[in-house]
Image (spheres, rainbow, N blue to C red):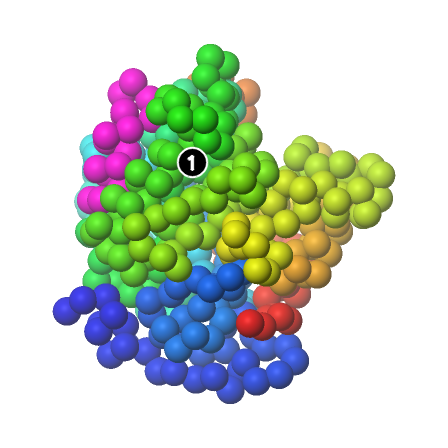
Amino acid sequence: MNRRLLAVALSVVSVLGFCAGTAPAQAAPATHPLHTSGRWILDAGNHRVKLAGVNWDGAESPEYVVAGLDKARLGDIAHWIKVNGFNSVRLPWSNEMYEHNPVVQDAYLTANPDLKGKRALDVFDAVVDALGAEGLMVILDNHVSRADWCCSGSDGNALWYTDQYPESNWINDWKGIVSRYRNRPQVVGVELRNEVRSNGTLTPVWGGGDPATDWAAAAERAGNAVLSVDQDLLVIVGGVNYQSDLTGVGGRPIRLSVGGRTVYAAHSYRWFVDVKDGYSAMKDQLGRQWGYLIAQGKPYTAPVWVSEFGTCLTWVSQCTQDDANFSNGIQRYLSEGDFDWAYWQLNGTQSDSLDHGSGKPRQHGALDWYGLLNTAWNGPSDAANVDRIKALEPVTQHP
């Protein structure tokens, strides 16, 4: 059964939540597949679907599994996401995880004994299925090539390819993982690569024609390969310079073999923007970087999904006034534009890293200070912060 028929069999259309005023981010299960029109993501009934989600990382790490499964039951974590109003989850994965598919260590699965002894992809399947069982949409994110924490210019994962994992592997791995989830309608999109950036020798740019550095052309090659396997997926393309810069799209939009599938992905953190000169300066900068893309009626108009934004929580000692300024500013900007978004991150605890020059060693089980969940993975780390993120969930603008 193809994706469209399976999704229709599993979904019920309801448009009552979209009549007027404010509506939940997803008032009823979306009828799949999703597509785009102008700045909007729409379902098969042409009703707006606002992605209001979280990032659940770990499968891209050297542990090869989402974090938290040593702390809480998989179904309980998925249920927490759902009952707090989020409708989607961005799931990072690595080419190493996909190609090597090792058995996940039992120590990372102690709260889920039924998953012990399984390989990484089998556990990943279980995560995708648990999220689908809660009615949550899933966006697969190729985060890194070699399994590790992201991101720096010297971590060996800066481009969409490496010596060990050339572009041909990247594209073939995408075709393989898309084929694997083709009949799971909760998988609605793919983010082709996370945070392309300079590796100190080569700097990716938007256009230019050099296959070693032209990220826009590479994204089209991979996007068309994905669509050759499943034409119903959203194909999500991030900007350059750690995904903070989509200025090149204005003169060179992504053109795919199937229309109505392109979504752009921006990332925003304190260090990307001016947080000292007031909201007006921050708003102008974000507008130039990527916010302009939602202006209707332009040759480049498309949805912008802010697939990562995160803030240091107020109760963590490392937090500063700059963190507070950024938190207030980015949430105001996302609210004013009613952007699609995914908060970084869900995780209450860290996964290990290899620390290949990133300067950011990670330790399994340590506090993840951007996380929505506490270190036991059974409730919020800071209820007020969770409420602030949840305030961004309602739909306030419509086609």
**Does 378 sit left or right of 214 as displayed?**
right
Along the viewing direction, whichever of 88 and 295 lies nearer the viewer: 295
**What span is in magenta?**
161-176
Answer yes or no: is residue 237 visible. yes
Vertical arrangement, residue 283 with respect to residue 239, above or below: below
Vertical arrangement, residue 4 with respect to residue 287, above or below: below
Residue drawn at x 28%, y 28% as measured from the top left: 167
Residue drawn at x 80%, y 42% as measured from the top left: 281
Residue 250 location, quadrant: top right
Residue drawn at x 24%, y 79% as measured from the top left: 9
Vertical arrangement, residue 45 with respect to residue 247, above or below: below
Q: Is residue 163 inside the magenta stretch?
A: yes
Along the viewing direction, whichever of 322 and 286 lies nearer the viewer: 286
Residue 99, x across and y down, in percent: 21, 34
Residue 389 location, quadrant: bottom right
Amino acid marked by disc 1: Ala
Residue drawn at x 76%, y 36% as measured from the top left: 274
Determine the residue located farthest toward the right in the rendered image.
277
**Does 189 sit left or right of 204 as displayed?**
left
Query: Element under label 1?
Result: helix
Residue 7, x across and y down, in percent: 27, 72
